[in-house]
Image: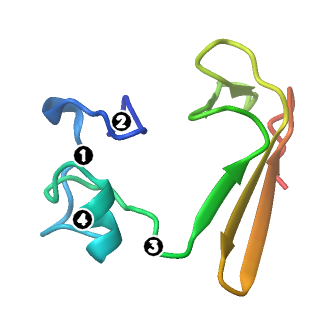
Amino acid sequence: CYDSPQGNCAPDKRVAAPGSGVGGAASDTHCQDQRWYCIGLPEGVQVSLSAALTEFSFDALGRPVAPNGSFASLALTIASPGETRSVTVNQETGYVQ
């Protein structure tokens, strides 16, 4: 969904999946409609954020912007059995590491 990444997406805003549904059983459980391009988290995968933030974007200068207009640095951690990866998005510069 290009205007509501949390899944509460109006049918006319959904991006169509190429061919049939994508992502398997996890996507079937998470997504509202198998015909749109939505991928659910596989079993055992956990995502955690350092801030109560559900979405953000980058402005024309590459700076991160939250829907409420402010953005603090964000740490995103994705964990699965046996593996953990972290990504940090820095305030003002938008540098992702």
Number of residue marks: 4
Question: Going by the image, does 35 lie left or right of 4?
Answer: left
Identify which amino acid the numbered label 4 is placed on.
Asp
Residue at the bottom extreme of this rendering: 82
Numbered circle sitting on residue 15: 1
In primary-sequence order, the first of circles 4 and 3 is 4
Numbered circle sitting on residue 28: 4
Residue at the spot 27% in from the left edge and 55% down from the top edge: 37
Residues packed near mark 1 inside 10 Å, few (<14), some (14 to 19) or many (20 plus): some
Question: Going by the image, does 27 lie left or right of 78?
Answer: left
Identify which amino acid the numbered label 1 is placed on.
Val
- Give the mark toward the camera: 3 or 2: 3
Numbered circle sitting on residue 42: 3
82 relative to 36, above or below: below
In primary-sequence order, the first of circles 4 and 2 is 2
Residue 29 is at least partly visible in this image: yes
Residue picked out by circle 2: 2
Residue 23 is at least partly visible in this image: no
- Give the mark toward the camera: 4 or 2: 4
In primary-sequence order, the first of circles 3 and 1 is 1
Asked if the residue under mark 3 is in contact with the one under mark 4, i.e. CB atoms within 8 Å, the reply is no
